[in-house]
Amino acid sequence: MAKLVLAAGVPHPPRLVFEMQQSPGKMKGEALMKQVREQVEKAEPDLIIEVDSDHFVNFFYNNLPSFCIGMAEQAQGPQEDWCPMPRYTVRGHVPFAKGLFQYGVHDKFDLAAAHELRLDHSLTVPLHFLNPEMRLPVVPIYTNGFASPLPLATRCVALGRMVRRFIDAWEGKERIALIASGCFAMDVGGPLRGWVDTEWAETISKLLMRGQYQTLARRATEERINAAGNNSGELLNWIAVAGAVGKTKPLFLESDEGNGYAVWKFD
C-alpha cells in the first residue's frame, strides 16, 4: 500500500530565488528551505503531491475551478519569463492522478481535471528547492486562492482528508510527500503591498503548531483572508494539507515575512 511519509509547507516567491542567487547563505528563507529539503530527502518519497494555487496561467476568471487535479504526463515551467530559474520539465503520475480524481468524485467532491498544464512559479519554485533534479513525479492539486468566492477553509480540510484516505487506499507502493505551496499573508501589486499582517501570520503559525487545524479553518473566513492581502488565499493550500495530517503536529514550523516553512513526519 502507498504511504504518506512527509507533509510540508513552503512559500513560492520568485524573489527568494533571486535573492539567494545574489546573496547565497545570507537569507533566512534559504536556511528554512534547506531544512525542509533535508527532511524531504530523509523521507525518501517516490511521489510528490503539491497543493497549489494557479496564478492565472492555466485558469482565469472565466473558468476557475475550486479544486482541480493535474493529470498531464508532463508539463513545463515556470512559464513566466521573468522568473529567475531554469524552465523545467516536470513528470506527472497519470494513474495516481486519475485514481485520485475518481476517488474524489465518488467522495462527493466536484473536482475538475486538467490533462494539459502550463506550470507557473507557484508550483515550480518549491520544486526548484525540494526536487531540483525533477527526479520525482508530481501530481498537482490546484485550489482557487484568488477569485471570489474562495472555497470554504473547512471544505479544504475535507479535501485534505479525502486525499489522505485515497493515499491509504492506493494499491501502489509509493512513498508520498504532500507539499503545500503558498504564503500566510501577502499582498502583491495591490494597495497593501509591502505590508505584512503579522498578527494573522502569527495566529496561523500558533494554530498550526498546536495542531488546531479545525480552529484555523473556522477562523480563515474569506473576509479575514482578504484582509491580509490579495495573495493570502494561498493559506487554503496549507489548510488542505493540514486536513491530511490528522492529529500529527509539525516537526517544526517557522514564519518569515508572512511566509511559512513547516514539516510533518509520519514514522
Image: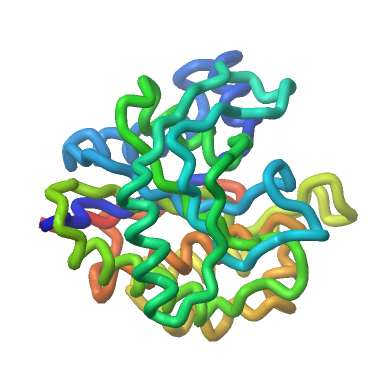
Spot the residue most to the right: 191
**Drawn side of residue 250 relative to residue 18, left or right:** left
User: Can residue 106 be seen in the rendering of this structure?
Assistant: yes
**Drawn side of residue 62 relative to residue 126, left or right:** right
- Residue 161 sits in quarter: bottom left
Foreground residue among 19 and 118: 118
- Please state, as top left, top right, bottom left or bottom right, where the N terminus lies in the image: bottom left
User: Can residue 255 be seen in the rendering of this structure?
Assistant: no
Foreground residue among 105 and 227: 105
Residue under the point 50% across and 81% down: 154
Question: In the image, is residue 20 above or below residue 255?
Answer: above
Residue under the point 36% across and 30% down: 131
Question: In the image, is residue 210 above or below residue 241?
Answer: below
**Drawn side of residue 188 relative to residue 233, left or right:** right
- Please state, as top left, top right, bottom left or bottom right, where the C terminus lies in the image: bottom left
Image spot of residue 142 (x, y percent)? 55, 55
Image spot of residue 69 (x, y percent)? 49, 56
